[in-house]
Image (cartoon, rainbow, N blue to C red):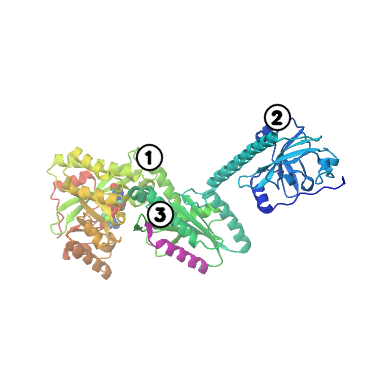
Amino acid sequence: MNQSTYIAPKIPEGEEERLAELYGLELLDTASDLRFDRYTSLVAELFDFPIVLITLVDRDRQWFKSKLGWNKSECPRDISFCGHAINQDSLLVVPNALEDPRFAGNPLVTGDPHIRFYAGAVVRGPTGHALGTLCVLDHKPRHFDEVQCTRLRHFADLVENEIAHCADLLALKGSIELSAYYDPLTHLPNRELLMNRLDQLLELANVESLQVVVLLFNVTGLRLINQSLGTHAGDELLRQLADRLQDTCPAGGSVARLQADELVLIFPVKADSQREAFTHKIHAALERPYRCEGQEHYLSVKIGGSLFPGQGKSAGALIEQASAAIRLSPEGLAEPVHYFDHAYSDSLSEHLRIESCLKGALARDEFYLLYQPIFSLRTGKMTGVEALLRWRCQELGQVTPDQFIPVAEENGLIVPIGRWVRKEVFRQLQVWCRETDWDITVAINVSPAELVQPTFSQDLLERLAFSQIPAKLLRIEITEHSLVRDNEIVDKNLAWLKEQGIEINIDDFGTGYSSLSYLRRLPVSSLKIDRSFIDALPASEDGATITCTIIDMAKALGLEQVAEGIEKIEQLAFLREHQCAYGQGYFLSHPLTSEKISVLRGGSGVFDFQ
Ligand code: C2E
Ligand code: MG
Ligand code: MG
């Protein structure tokens, strides 16, 4: 026999897939591992072999995951025995290498470590590719019987289990890493990943002179949706919103979820016109109705924007500015996106200061109420008052409701504050009722965040009953804006209050979008015509027409009409001439303390129109 030759192993079919599985397991060139070493020790002991290896056959080498009796960590593939072993299903057994033409001239046989005997059982990965072997070697020829073959195969199966276990751990590690960067609900990148991407985009924009647009999407009323339709519905709507943003995301852009109700889209553009085209497309995609549980829904999404260069210089600053743009830009802008304005920085810090002071305001007893009289415009008699909340802050001084109510609504503090207002009104009504035969109604303003509390009406009615105040003395005022379309809890709360004799006013009427049919369905008793229309009287034709239309419409629907914000005698004259039933405003009376109301009521309580 020619001892100077040997045969290099064949490269199996599907070699690339085999290598892909091997590399995917990330086992090559890793540290020694007891999980594998215990098998090589056991096998060495049990079969009495000087060399036992767990090998992995790489493209050009075989590498030893576990080795006993061999001092190298790898050897070339073309002289490896295992390279042959992985090409067959059954064990490769070479009783005497010197007598086997494949190995007789192999340097591992003719030289160190002088292999004579080899038996190798193939070890496969979780998807079935042969990765390497569990093999036993000896420096002298040996016999290996059937039983030993079967046993070695069983040990190889155990090694395969360990490899599968490693693969599971790797996948688990991958998913843990994934969850550190992705939002589980929408599968969108989270804040951390978004910040990385935005940093990269800013670098690119610097080099290529691009503009970067940051758009922040705030789902207004997500809390209301969750409370009224259930969180699964809120989740579903959010997922749909995320899908739409991804579908319309311009090339090179990214979408991410920053908070429960806040998504962000970043993208590069070359010119303003391109940015406008994209934002209009995105806005149009969000405006379409959403479908959830067989019903159509409309999501109200506010969009705040910031631009680079020009505004923020860092990822963090741009996101903050887009967020400030949402919170601080004026209502009713025609443009779909509210872009940041540097003037907002001041308002933002004021907003934050208000928020921080507001948290302790109840405990510090800083709230009090004023009552603004409401007069019959026919008789001049004071028929009601509206309770108006005032806040004298220790630190900020007097803060107006228009400044602090939106903040309280945003962070949920409006709920305990509203409860305090009702308690205080009930206490005052008890005093008034005790003093006189009180028949003046007190109207309380209620925020949407309160109305969606399922226990709102029950809580109010229980306290009312406890105070022994007749329900007819109480009214609640809700703004048109608070009438979230088809909110079952709001509808139930209103229906129950009305059933128990509490009348409901629609405040700031004319600025919202209530349809007539919706108004008809609600248990409402009066419309308060928004101050902006009264302000325009009588000079503005539009103001006059709208005011008259609202008065006529209210009468047709059997609703009372109250004009808000009467400041001038001409406005009063116009309203009286057009037979508006009630009025309120500085010309008639400013909001007053409870003592002054008592005095006014104790006197004639009648406004003299002459
Ligand atoms: P609103 O319910 O429409 O209250 C009427 C507002 O118009 C009051 O402002 C009142 O002082 C003001 N006003 C009355 N007559 C005139 C006038 O002739 N000219 C002008 N320019 N203003 C007049 P205020 O007290 O600053 O309250 C602003 C808003 O804050 C209220 O609007 C209401 O929406 C909200 N608010 C006030 N108190 C409460 C409260 O206890 N709870 C809730 N949720 N909201 C409240
Ligand atoms: Mg009001
Ligand atoms: Mg109003």
- Please tell me whether residue 362 belongs to the stretch shown in magenta: no
Foreground residue, 141 or 174? 141
Residue 325, visible in the rendered structure: no
Foreground residue, 184 or 483? 184
What amino acid does circle 1 point to?
Answer: Gly
Label 1 SS? helix
Real-space Cα distance between discs 1 and 2? 75 Å
Task: Note whether 50 is above or below 265 in the view shown.
Answer: above
What amino acid does circle 3 point to?
Answer: Leu
Query: Which is closer to the viewer, label 3 or label 2?
Result: 2
Check residue 469 in the rendering and tell me which mark sits there, or answer none: none
Where is residue 87 shown, x and y percent of the image? Answer: 71, 48
Task: Note whether 265 is above or below 125 in the view shown.
Answer: below
What span is colored magenta in the figure? 273-291
Residue, disc 2: 46
| Magenta stretch: helix, strand or loop mostly | helix
Which mark sits nearer the N-terminus, 1 or 2? 2
Residue, disc 1: 360
* Apparent side of residue 124 relative to residue 434 in the rendered image (left or right): right
Label 3 SS? helix
Quadrant showing the C terminus: bottom left
